[in-house]
Amino acid sequence: AGVTDNSGRIIVPSDYHVKYDGAQVFRVTVNNSKGRKRVNDLVDKGVVEKWRSNTTSIDIMAKADKLTAVKQYLEKAKLTYEVVLEDVQRAIDEENPDISEEELALLTGRKGHRMTFHKYHRMEDIHGYLDYLAQTYPQLVNITDIGRSLEGRPLKVIQIISGHPNAKRFWIDGGIHAREWITPATVTYILSELVENREAQDEYLKKIDFYILPIVNPDGYEYTHTNERLWRKNRRQGTTCTGTDLNRNWGFHWGGVGSSKEQCQQIYAGSGPFSEPETQAVSKFILANNAKMKAFVTFHSYGQYILYPWGYSKRVPQDYADLDRVGRAAAEAMRLTGGGAYTVGNSAQLLYPAAGASDDWAKGVAKIKYAYTIELRDKGKYGFLLPASNILPVGKESLAAVKAIASEIYKGK
Ligand code: ARG
Ligand code: ZN
């Protein structure tokens, strides 16, 4: 179908996209370091792409022309695997419904924006909604352009100002990884509930100031809509490959384990700490506003985890018991919405060590006590290609998590 603009005109023909016909995702069971290394060799050589990994299994995507070779390799290495996603291109074609202009108008009630929680939107629609909120609720909502992406797109932080003296502050972001489409949608949903459904919220929630950035990586996000659905990094042009992993670029244990100096790797940490305008802008803004900032939640997908530092090593912060307890309260709140089961724990222990990520920086440098990475749905059936019908349920469970954390920081010193 290609990519259409707001009036339905095709602006990017479908053959412009990288195609994934016949590509599959495998879940490989790894119960020792040798098996893990075998799989990682395939990833490092670029034969397959890593989608997700934890202590017991690794999800890898293989394109059609590599399927047979990859299966043979795994069998020879005596590794057991199952196919979790049978046709990547079909999942891409089906994840985002085409909503007609008429339906869109009905869904939005012809308000001054195009946002719905029934499909994944382009950046323009999301930013249009932020502007609409700022115009409609000028007493409550403030927009700050905290900087620009490498390609010049604005980084728009929405501030929800409680007006409460000594309000605690809560940072929320999404879209640092381009292909994790559920995250800007979820963050925008949370924002909509905090602003447009404010009367329904508990009193404590109205006494907290929220700082919300729905798309940390707008260049990458747009690129996943126009060219390559599964792009992860930003669009930094290198000498050999394009893209810096913005979640390895932060100036705290930068360049350590779980990041790479190789431009062609998905976990390329960049040429130096904060080499990228996106991480630079966000970190500067947070440091300028971190007084009374008590919570930092960065949304990713997928796997259903609530993760706390450290990520650069398997050590935990000295107050980790607090992070664990509040993380568990958040997971329980998510479950009570009828939502998914989320596992809580230290990120390096539950998943893998990865240095230079934003959560560690938030905790270690910005000194924000409750710093979490939340990996949203699902557990692997669709992975990054989660159908848009999940936006509302995931939005609801994520709002429940935010509320659980907010109630804790409200009570706290
Ligand atoms: N999926 C995220 C990533 O790979 C997890 C980050 C968890 N935090 C950490 N500091 N390692 O970027
Ligand atoms: Zn991610």
Image (cartoon, grey):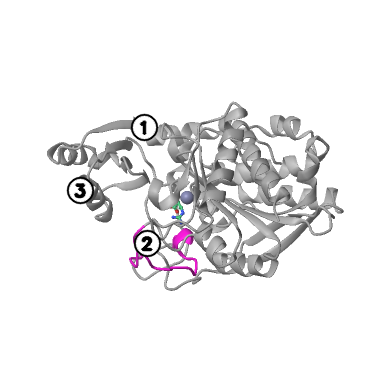
User: Label 1 to label 3, Cα distance in Å?
Assistant: 24 Å
Residue position marked by numbered label 3 in the rendering: 38
Q: Which image quarter holds the C terminus?
A: bottom right
Instruction: Look at 39% across and 59% down and name the residue there.
Output: 313
Residue position marked by numbered label 1 in the rendering: 87
Residue 62 in the image: x percent, y percent?
29, 42
- Mark 1–mark 2 CB contact (< 8 Å): no
User: Label 1 to label 2, Cα distance in Å?
Assistant: 29 Å
User: Label 2 to label 3, Cα distance in Å?
Assistant: 18 Å
Q: Hey, which residue is sitting farthest right in the picture? A: 139
Which callout, 2 or 3, points at the residue further toward the start of the chain? 3
Which callout, 1 or 3, points at the residue further toward the start of the chain? 3
Residue type at mark 2: give it.
Answer: Ser
258 is within the stretch colored magenta: yes
| Local SS, label 3 | helix
For residue 259, which numbered disc appears in the image? 2
Q: In this view, does 159 lie to the left or right of 385?
A: right
Which callout, 1 or 2, points at the residue further toward the start of the chain? 1
Q: Between 303 and 152, which is closer to the camera in this rendering?
A: 303
Residues packed near mark 2 inside 10 Å, few (<14), some (14 to 19) or many (20 plus) = many
Q: Is residue 368 visible?
A: yes
Q: What stretch is highlighted in magenta?
A: 244-265
Residue 266 in the image: x percent, y percent?
38, 56
Q: Is the magenta stretch mostly helix, strand or loop?
A: loop
Residue type at mark 3: give it.
Answer: Arg
